[in-house]
């Protein structure tokens, strides 16, 4: 995504990523106790409904100028995400579906932390939720940083890690409805010192298989850890059908990008999003391609 930074109020994805990063750094961790019943434990006050496991995130996203109706985002930013999502949706559910195995499973990752990965994951999921014929499930797999969970105010509640560590839980037990139509979310869950091993475990493979089978008509976005600092992301990349790779222009050395890209399976359908670019057009671009099998 080639974007031009501006001095005035935030009008580009670059500026909004930076603003969001600052707000997230100031957020307080939600006080929570794990629960396996129908109540969403640890969600913000009045955010959870016991019966429906529904969380209210719209006001929070509006306050952070995310891609939801009523926010202050300009038309250009909305169009940026339309360009990013269109080939992904086509590979998942459209004319290219037969060409991309598990195309409805999408991993968003980067080389290193701080490139706007989680911000992109949330806005991409929100953009897909606007589709007429699809729903979207956003899963926070970045257990250490919990960028998505913190952004939505869902940190430290029962989520992915809890399912991986408890055979009595399944993904349906931690799947949260939201007050945004067609948008579902699974938080990262309580921090566990063995989360890296959990994400690389057979249990995680089985969980992804379950999600792919149970929600074949739904697009699932996994916000994964950066590739280089954490070995488990390479395994996650092999479990999904598509990878969205975030690159921060002017920060990430080309050698690191190349090292990270080599960790993604060659047969993977993949797109690159160039983020935080100075001096270029503020129109976003998504570059997708199928890697050569040779």
Image: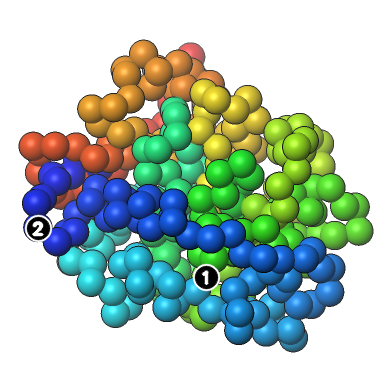
**What residue is shown at x 44% (from left), y 56% (from top)?**
26
Looking at the rendered image, the quarter that the N terminus falls into is top left
From the viewer's perspective, is residue 57 above or below residue 97? Answer: below
Horizontal arrangement in the rendering, residue 231 relative to residue 69 (left or right): right
x and y, in percent, of residue 91 in the image: 45, 49
Residue designated by label 2: 8
Judge the density around disc 1: few (<14), some (14-19), many (≥20) Cα neighbours within 10 Å: many
Q: Secondary structure at mark 1?
A: strand
**What residue is shown at x 74% (from left), y 61% (from top)?**
158
The residue nearer to you, when weighing 98 against 55, is 55
Horizontal arrangement in the rendering, residue 41 relative to residue 239 (left or right): right
Mark 1 touching mark 2, by CB under 8 A?
Answer: no
Residue designated by label 1: 183
Q: Secondary structure at mark 2?
A: loop
x and y, in percent, of residue 139 in the image: 60, 55
x and y, in percent, of residue 23 in the image: 38, 57
């Amino acid at each position: 995504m080639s974007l031009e930074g501006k001095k005035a109020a935030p009008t580009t994805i670059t500026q909004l990523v930076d603003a969001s990063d600052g707000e997230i750094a100031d957020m307080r961790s939600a006080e929570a106790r794990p629960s396996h019943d129908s109540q969403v434990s640890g969600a913000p006050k009045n955010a959870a409904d016991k019966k429906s496991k529904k969380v209210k995130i719209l006001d929070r996203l509006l306050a952070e100028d995310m891609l939801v109706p009523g926010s202050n985002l300009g038309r250009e930013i909305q169009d940026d995400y339309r360009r990013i999502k269109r080939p992904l949706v086509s590979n998942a559910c459209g004319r290219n579906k037969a060409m991309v195995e598990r195309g409805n499973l999408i991993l968003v990752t980067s080389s290193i932390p701080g490139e706007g990965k989680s911000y992109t994951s949330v806005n991409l999921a929100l953009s897909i939720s606007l589709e007429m014929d699809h729903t979207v499930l956003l899963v926070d797999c970045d257990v250490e940083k919990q960028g998505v969970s913190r952004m939505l105010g869902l940190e430290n509640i029962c989520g992915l890690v809890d399912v991986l560590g408890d055979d009595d839980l399944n993904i349906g037990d931690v799947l949260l409805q939201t007050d945004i139509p067609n948008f579902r979310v699974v938080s990262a869950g309580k921090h566990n010192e063995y989360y890296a091993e959990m994400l690389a475990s057979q249990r995680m493979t089985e969980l992804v298989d379950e999600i792919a089978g149970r929600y074949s008509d739904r697009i699932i976005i996994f916000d994964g850890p950066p590739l280089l600092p954490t070995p488990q992301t390479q395994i996650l990349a092999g479990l999904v059908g598509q990878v969205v790779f975030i690159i921060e222009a002017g920060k990430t050395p080309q050698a690191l990008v190349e090292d990270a890209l080599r960790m993604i399976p060659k047969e993977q359908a993949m797109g690159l999003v160039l983020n935080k670019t100075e001096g270029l057009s503020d129109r976003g671009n998504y570059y997708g391609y199928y890697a050569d099998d040779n």
